[in-house]
Amino acid sequence: MKAKNKNYMWYKVKELSDKGLNKSQISMETGIDRATVRKYLSMKEKEFHLWLNNPKHLPHKLAPFMRFIKTELTQFPFLSAAQIEDRLKENFSDIPDIHSKTVYNFVQIVRKKYHLEKPAKEHFRQCEKLAEVAYGKQAQVDFGQCFMQTGTDKRVKIYFFCMVLSRSRMKFVYFQNQPFTAKTAVYAHELAFEYFEGIAKEILYDQDKVFIHDENLGDYLLTHDFKSFSQTQAFKIVFCRKADPQSKGKIESVVKYIKYNFLKGRIYSGIETLNQSAKQWLERTGNGKKHSTTLKIPLQEWHIEKTHLLPLKFMPVEPTSEWQIYNVRKDNTVAYRGNFYTLPLGTYQGTNTKVYLELIENRLNIYSKNKQPITNHQVSLNKGELVRNTNHGRDLSLTWEQTQKEVLQILGNTEKSILYLELLKTDKPRYYHDNLRAIKHGLTSIPKEIIEKTILFCLETKTYNGHMICEIATNYLRQNQQKDNLKIYTEIAGEKKKTIIQQISITPQTSNINTYEKLF
């Protein structure tokens, strides 16, 4: 009540009291509460004006919760009084039994006192209300999606399925962290039927690709999984016309209600936690509070409507995880939802290399074409990020034992080569496989006589490193190539052996004398 109206009412109450009316009669005459009449009669005019000019008296029942409300409004100034009421009930078991109007008035006082103004309200599409239907006749279904903040100030996109019984306004919502498919939508239907303890005689749908993949003047071609599901059910399927959201205004309101009452300002801490919180919210607020249109409590109305629902003859069966095929990139990564996830080196085998992806909670499991596990990653909430496993830079197609056999073959499989690898493994046990791979790639084209000389040198100098042994072998090879530029002539005369080495192909560089003369 505004101050001007209160001022008028005080004088009106006093006037009626002077005429001899009692408190109950004054209350009936003015339309104000009897307790307010009693308060006005107890105050003198000066006392009343002092009280009127100091309207910051906090309701006693909510005073202990002012700090919590202030914190919520500071962090999320867009929260409505209805959301604040729900969060009080969610976080405090000792919340007193109060009217929603009391909460609204208290929230307005807190906003004014701490300058926490609510942002300008967005303009939403207006939907026409359908005529009331009989109990158990109709339900409406729709999907929604929303970004939520995590505890680390990142955003995650969540998707939800919701159903409402048209008469009682009893609601159901189910969340998941990936887009709905026909299989997961069927599972969400089963969960809703279990929650309602029955099935409506007809269900109204939007023309969503989850349910239909084509339309021809009212003839709908259902997706395979949804068609199989509908054929086993007794309810009638009704699809809205395209661009005609008004025909399912009840579920449109539910989607908005879930977004702006339950989700808005809520921190994401896992899909299971979100679904559990949603069930509690439905009980205390979504279905537990009086509906603004029917002015009835959906939960109470549902007790009537469930007796008119079709019986439930099955229990929900969670669908097996669905695998999606993705292409492997040349750099042995796979792109998924704006990020890149590494695969073991060697996974890419050409342009037609594909893998299967399976998302379970926040883990991305990757399988080969024959559905053998390759690797798994924690799903990143960022965009454009490279998510890497440290061992994906190695070729895991061969074990270190197999690599050791190949390296021994390259080294000549001699006693010295076996001894060298044993000493290398003892010196660098954690990096033994990496050293083997370096030797395998570095000594493949080196002649065996050079390798033998290199192994002997490394044993003498205690050089146990894959890159170093390759470098030493390369230096020996380079020296031999330089000697090949010399022709060796041997002349034998009697018992005397004479070796004449004549330099070939190496011509000494000469200088022009004029160059030196110019310097002086």
Image (tube, rainbow, N blue to C red):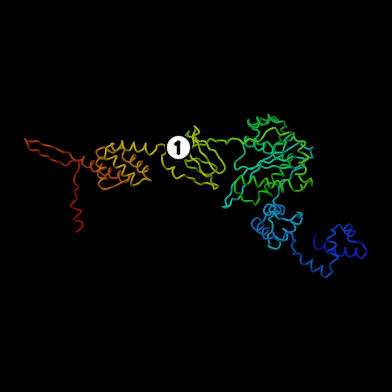
Which residue in the rendered view is the most extreme toward the left?
494
- Could you say where residue 228 lies in the image, as x and y percent from the top left? 65, 29
- Could you say where residue 345 lies in the image, as x and y percent from the top left? 43, 40
Which residue in the rendered view is the most extreme toward the bottom?
46
Q: How many marks?
A: 1
Q: Quadrant of the N terminus?
A: bottom right
Which residue in the rendered view is the most extreme toward the front?
94
Q: Quadrant of the C terminus?
A: bottom left
Residue at 33 percent across and 45 percent down: it is 426
User: Measured along the vertical axis of the image, is residue 337 above or below residue 153?
Assistant: above
Residue at the disc numbered 1: 347
Horizontal arrangement in the rendering, residue 426 relative to residue 147 (left or right): left
Q: Quadrant of residue 236?
A: top right
Q: Nearer the viewer, residue 169 or 244?
A: 169
Q: Quadrant of residue 235?
A: top right
Horizontal arrangement in the rendering, residue 374 relative to residue 290 (left or right): left
* Callout 1 secondary element: loop
Q: Nearer the viewer, residue 494 or 300?
A: 300
- Could you say where residue 165 lies in the image, as x and y percent from the top left? 74, 40
- Could you say where residue 81 lies in the image, as x and y percent from the top left? 72, 54
Which residue in the rendered view is the most extreme toward the right?
19
Q: Nearer the viewer, residue 121 or 371?
A: 371
Residue at 63 percent across and 46 percent down: it is 274
Residue at 92 percent across and 65 percent down: it is 18
Other-residue count near label 1 (Cα within 10 Å), few / some / many at <14 / 14–19 / ≥20 = many
Horizontal arrangement in the rendering, residue 498 relative to residue 15 (left or right): left
> Hey, what amino acid is under mark 1?
Thr
Q: Quadrant of residue 242?
A: top right
